[in-house]
Amino acid sequence: MSSIQERLQGRWRITETDTWDNDYLDLVEAAFIAFEQNGAGEFRFGAVVAALDCAYSQTDVGFRFQGSDEGDEVSGEGWAECKGVDTIHGEIAFWNGDETTFKARRWPKS
């Protein structure tokens, strides 16, 4: 496992995007993006739920996603990189749709 994969593994609370406000982000539940050890992951924000297929480089993770937004199929791609110990930023781009940057902080462990 690469060090970037180890650093990104886990759940991250999406705190900001340049497209949607926090009321929309947390519409159904607290917005998050998660990266798993096996190269999978997921994100949820607003009415969007998507599964990630991740590929790690030396400095970041790129991903493709498939899921739904209010029952409509959605897909696209994105990336994320570390901006400190407990902060990441990146981009989510829906194919034939919206594109946004995001910021997230490590989800507190319970």
Image: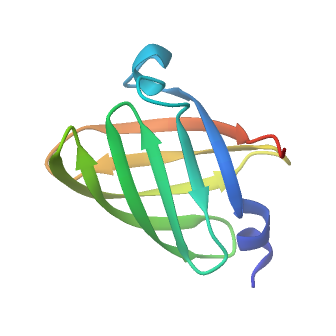
Quadrant housing the N terminus: bottom right
Q: Give 57 or 50, whichever is nearer the viewer.
A: 50
Residue 21 relative to residue 57: left or right: left
Residue 73 relative to residue 65: left or right: left
Q: Image quadrant of residue 3?
A: bottom right
Quadrant housing the C terminus: top right
- Find residue 16 and report its horizontal and vertical position in percent: 55, 26
For the point 62% across and 64% down, the residue is 60
Numbered marks: total: 0
Residue 96 relative to residue 15: left or right: left
Query: Is 37 rendered above or below residue 85?
Result: below
- Find residue 66 and report its horizontal and vertical position in percent: 29, 62
For the point 24% across and 50% down, the residue is 68
- Find residue 45 and report its horizontal and vertical position in percent: 43, 36
Query: Is 84 rendered above or below residue 27?
Result: below
Q: Which colouring convention does the figure follow?
A: rainbow
- Find residue 32 and report its horizontal and vertical position in percent: 56, 42
For the point 61% across and 76% down, the residue is 57
Query: Is 57 rendered above or below residue 19?
Result: below
In the displayed image of the protein, which residue is found farthest to the bottom? 1
